[in-house]
Image (cartoon, rainbow, N blue to C red):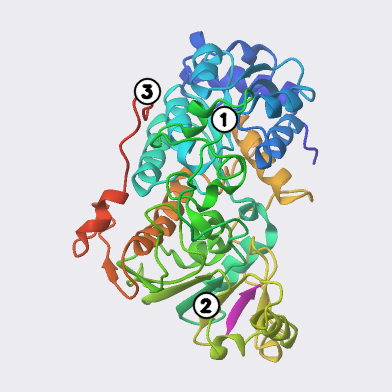
Amino acid sequence: MTNRPNRRRFLSQTAAVTAGVGYFAGTSLAADTKPESALNALAAGCIGVGGKGGSDTSHIGNQGVRVAGLCDVDRDTLKKKGREFPDAEKFDDFREMLDKLGDKIDIVTCSTPDHTHAAACVQAMNMGKHIYCQKPLTWSISEARLMRETAEKTGVVTQMGNQGTSEDGLREAVEIIRSGAIGDVSEVHIFSNRPVWPQGGGRPDKVDPVPDSLNWEAWIGPAPMRPYVSGAYHSFNWRGWVDFGTGALGDMACHTTNMPVMALKLWDPVAVTAVKNPGIVDGEQFPASSELMFEFPEREGLPPCKFHWYDGGNLPSEEIISMLPESFQKRIAKQREGGRKMSGAVVVGSKGIVFSPDDYGAKYYLLPKDQYEDFQLPEQSLPRIPFKASADERQKWEFVSTIKGEYEPGTMSNFSYAGRLTETILVGNLAMRAGEGQRIEWNAKELMSPNVESVNQFVQRDYREGWKLG
């Protein structure tokens, strides 16, 4: 199986689709208004092309997609990426790119800070564009709901960038848990080595000149305007600021919780509590460390389950750690002594546990080891991507091949799934807004807390003038 698209097959499928129902390549664009790019190959406009966005752009291009537009608020980054795609038009504001290239692109990739994901992607989906968006899907809970609903309404192909979803190991672990091999699961423990950026501080008391190369207005996007401070926000440290990022939880939970969430249908918690919560400093930054507990009710015959999250060096109890392989117990002991932090997922069942030391959930252990020495894998129920490559490349192939109609199972981290995952995870950040030990009840249907009304203001945000959803 090759990563490159089969042009003859693609064009023949396209002709059949457009002749039959008046749509092009799975988009919601009518055949008589299909993009100019349809005459040759799929074309993409890529928003955020530095850092992770740089590799996202390259990987999309590696799938035979023509990169027609590059957008980044940092014109130095834009210039650098432009050397790889010299024919792409360049923009420093995605609104301008979508306005100008709207009829010339089929795909939009979005690899910007969390707070601009929804503004870019909802507009693009309403224009009939297929979307690849980095995790977490959105900055706010209500945006995650809107992204899911918009994707379902428009019928475009979508994929969130939690690359582990494409890995055979994650899908296999999901099948094992679903098979009942470890029994009924009543608790899940996820610990993360994040944050690896500053958290737990207040706003800087200085102002720096905005570099000539930076469109600060576009970088701030729908968030409240604030002065530029060199190194404080752009280009990496934004994750710790509540106006722009979603902290350690938002950054990594869409990776590290992905496997147990998928296996156990951990949607729509009924409550979340910040067990350890130093608090958000002056309403500006997430705390440097936290411990959360989510409560899930019975779900389609699955027993109630508690999900525990630990970051900033916090770890599960010794009882949980003692269940892990000795080598990992030693690593955790070193962490407790000030050594390198590690991540892990422990899914505790009534018969055994699944432990993954991999951020993506792609590697796992069935424990106790001697109990599962002769374990036979359950019958495969989830599709596998039919070639070996990096998780990034596999997920981009899954996305592009689904658009072209060449991969029947479709994208697994589509927004119907990823929207629910993101929504669930971001409820945890509401607990950061409340006091330590405060149990926040959650009504997922109405997207509100009935008992701690003060956190409801953070479920969504008012966009700054000039920015909108849709």
The answer to whether the residue labelled 2 contacts the one labelled 1, judged by CB atoms less than 8 Å apart, is no
Mark closer to the chain start, 2 or 1: 2
**Above or below 359: residue 1:** above
- What range of the chain is rendered magenta? 352-356
Residue 234: percent from left, percent from top: 59, 39
Q: Which mark is residue 466?
A: 3
Amino acid type at mark 1: Pro
Residue 195: percent from left, percent from top: 58, 61
Q: Gap between marks 1 and 3, in whole Å? A: 23 Å
- Which of the two residues, 205 or 4, is positioned nearer the viewer here? 205
Q: Is residue 135 visible?
A: no
Q: Gap between marks 3 and 2, in whole Å? A: 52 Å
- Whether residue 354 appears in magenta in the rendering, the answer is yes
The residue pinned by badge 2 equals: 180
Q: Which mark is residue 209?
A: 1
Mark toward the viewer: 1 or 3: 1
| Residue lying at 66% horizontally and 24% vertically, measured from the top left | 75
Amino acid type at mark 3: Gly
* SS type, badge 1: loop
